[in-house]
Image (cartoon, rainbow, N blue to C red):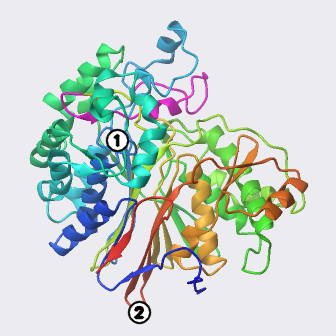
């Protein structure tokens, strides 16, 4: 394994013997460790962490959003949980045509799908957890009731996207105190959210999808013209399936099946598997070029085909057929860019990702999101719930697999991942960042497997992302590399903000050690004991 340069900026990978948690917020990591030390397992700790982040990272996540998870019990088979919500039962395409709506704005009430996160947490806790939601949600309840301190990256994002809150007066009152975004070190409170979390802690999913909380959310949405009903909320249930997977250099990359974009990550992994990306074998420009070429093809397939699995016309198996992959690889030239095609779905959205492995070997990879920064910007004031805008990912093109429809799940960007070495989990990881996530998964595993970096070094490496016909480059990528890419025919631009945010845990079965990483692009930490 390659050692990092201790003279250069960066941080060391975290190490532990018993358990490890990696999140994008320090308080969330500490909450997870507290749960683990108090007798909770990996599932309990992951929910505690992500619930707390829904309070302290409200622009990223919360109970008004969705959740996906991969869980591998110690010595058992992995399962995939789809906790994404559905459109209202009344959301017929004809309604939008009659209203003259040709696209669903990410600030529209019609972008709000039924939040699926609480249903997912409840299922995970009841099925795989150890200590129950009442104990799990206490850190989040205390933060909402007693207050929390704004950290630097949270403050940066809050200020950048504050305008999204001004369209809905209740949201502005709660999240823009004094009419402006809070700054680093400020303290905020959300007693209404604390009350709702206490209700969920006592009653589980019923505390959110039935009764006063659901009534408040539906009334808020209906007042803005939404089609949502209490029946839509009552019907919400997560789906439990097997993960989908593909080979990369002899390892198995596991993703959640559609409606998430994990399939695009598998496509990229299979395309890149045909090129030698070992350390010293290719240049930095070669790596970025091949990642971009793989992304062009994988994202085209994603946008054409990935949707609610009940409505997909092409199977996962067909898209991953090795003859198709081989044909894609053969069309990629190392010295020139292929013709660009723009993606037709919004680019950067907000999410939090949590990875936890406990002392018994249970491993959970969990991601939770309200999609755009502050979601739809619509806030149910009585219950303290800021609502997601995942429905803006629907198409309004008749016949498209991802066309909006009654009780249909939209295409989703959020994807947790695991990598197996044989029949044992080797990596539990995720890379936040909306559309970037599939690209981020491929980039991360290549840094670990091909270059031999430890997982913190792999996370720290400069990132690039091909989208909308251009390769976006983080400014840590050299001018020489940028010029090389442009000579091959790529258009390039420098990223205005960091690309994604990675958390990861590596399980060293031979030595009984856990390795943890948390992205320097966020405020978070990885810690174990």
Which residue carries the number 1 mark?
182
Residue 260 vs residue 475: left or right? left
* Residue 462 painted magenta: no
**Can residue 165 be seen in the rendering of this structure?**
yes
Left or right of 425? Residue 138 is left
Q: Position of residue 208 (x, y in %)?
A: 20, 37
Q: Earlier in the sequence, mark 2 or mark 1?
A: 1
Label 2 sits on a secondary structure element that is loop
Q: Position of residue 102 (x, y in %)?
A: 58, 17
Crowd class of label 1 (few under 14; some 14 to 19; many from 20; radius 10 Å): many
Secondary structure category for the residue under label 1? loop
Residue furthest to the left? 202
Indicate left or right for 174 with 510 as reference: left
Front of the two marks 2 and 1: 1
Circle 2 crowding by C-alpha within 10 Å: few under 14, some 14–19, many from 20: few
Specify whether residue 388 is painted magenta. Answer: yes
What span is colored magenta in the figure? Answer: 381-409
Quadrant of the rendered structure where residue 444 is?
Answer: bottom right
**Residue identified by numbered label 2:** 511
**Quadrant in the rendering for residue 205:** top left
In the picture as drawn, the residue positioned furthest to the bottom comes out as: 511
């Amino acid at each position: 394994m390659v050692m990092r340069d201790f003279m250069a900026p960066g941080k060391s990978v975290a190490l532990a013997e018993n358990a490890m948690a990696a999140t994008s917020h320090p308080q969330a990591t500490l909450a997870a460790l507290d749960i683990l030390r108090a007798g909770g397992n990996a599932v309990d700790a992951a929910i505690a962490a992500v619930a707390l982040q829904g309070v302290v990272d409200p622009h990223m996540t919360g109970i008004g959003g969705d959740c996906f998870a991969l869980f591998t019990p110690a010595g058992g088979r992995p399962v995939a949980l789809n906790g994404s919500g559905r459109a209202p039962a009344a959301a017929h395409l004809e309604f939008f045509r009659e209203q003259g709506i040709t696209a669903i704005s990410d600030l529209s009430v019609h972008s709000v799908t039924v939040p699926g996160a609480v249903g997912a947490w409840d299922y995970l806790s009841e099925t795989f957890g150890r200590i129950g939601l009442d104990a799990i949600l206490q850190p989040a309840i205390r933060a909402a009731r007693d207050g929390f301190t704004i950290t630097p990256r949270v403050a940066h994002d809050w200020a950048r996207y504050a305008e999204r809150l001004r369209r809905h007066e209740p949201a502005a009152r709660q999240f823009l105190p004094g009419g402006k975004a809070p700054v680093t070190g400020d303290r905020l409170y959300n007693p209404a959210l604390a009350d709702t979390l206490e209700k969920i802690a006592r009653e589980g999913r019923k505390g959110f999808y039935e009764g006063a909380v659901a009534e408040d959310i539906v009334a808020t949405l209906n007042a803005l013209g939404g089609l949502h009903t209490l029946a839509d909320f009552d019907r919400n249930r997560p789906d439990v399936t097997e993960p989908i997977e593909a080979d990369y250099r002899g390892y198995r990359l596991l993703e959640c099946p559609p409606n998430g974009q994990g399939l695009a990550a598998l496509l990229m992994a299979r395309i890149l598997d045909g090129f030698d990306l070992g350390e010293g074998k290719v240049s930095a420009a070669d790596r970025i070029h091949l990642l971009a070429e793989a992304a062009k093809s994988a994202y085209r397939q994603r946008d054409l085909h990935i949707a609610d699995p009940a409505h997909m016309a092409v199977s996962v198996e067909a898209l991953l057929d090795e003859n198709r992959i081989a044909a894609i690889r053969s069309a990629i030239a190392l010295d020139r860019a292929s013709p660009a095609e723009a993606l037709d779905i919004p680019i950067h959205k907000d999410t939090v990702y949590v990875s936890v492995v406990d002392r018994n070997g249970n491993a959970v990879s969990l991601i939770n999101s309200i999609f755009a920064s502050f979601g739809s910007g619509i806030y149910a004031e009585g219950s303290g719930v800021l609502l997601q805008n995942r429905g803006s990912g629907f198409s309004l093109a008749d016949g498209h697999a991802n066309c909006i429809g009654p009780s249909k799940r939209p295409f989703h960007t959020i994807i947790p991942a695991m990598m197996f070495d044989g029949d044992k989990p080797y990596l539990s990881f995720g890379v936040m960042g909306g559309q970037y996530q599939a690209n981020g998964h491929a980039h991360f595993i290549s840094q670990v497997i091909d270059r031999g970096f430890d997982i913190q070094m792999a996370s720290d490496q400069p990132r690039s992302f091909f989208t909308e016909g251009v390769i976006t480059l983080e400014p840590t990528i050299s001018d020489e590399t940028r010029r090389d890419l442009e000579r091959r025919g790529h258009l390039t631009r420098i990223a205005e903000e960091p690309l994604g945010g990675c958390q990861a845990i590596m399980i060293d079965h031979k030595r009984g050690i856990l390795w943890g990483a948390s992205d320097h692009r966020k405020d978070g930490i990885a810690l174990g004991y």
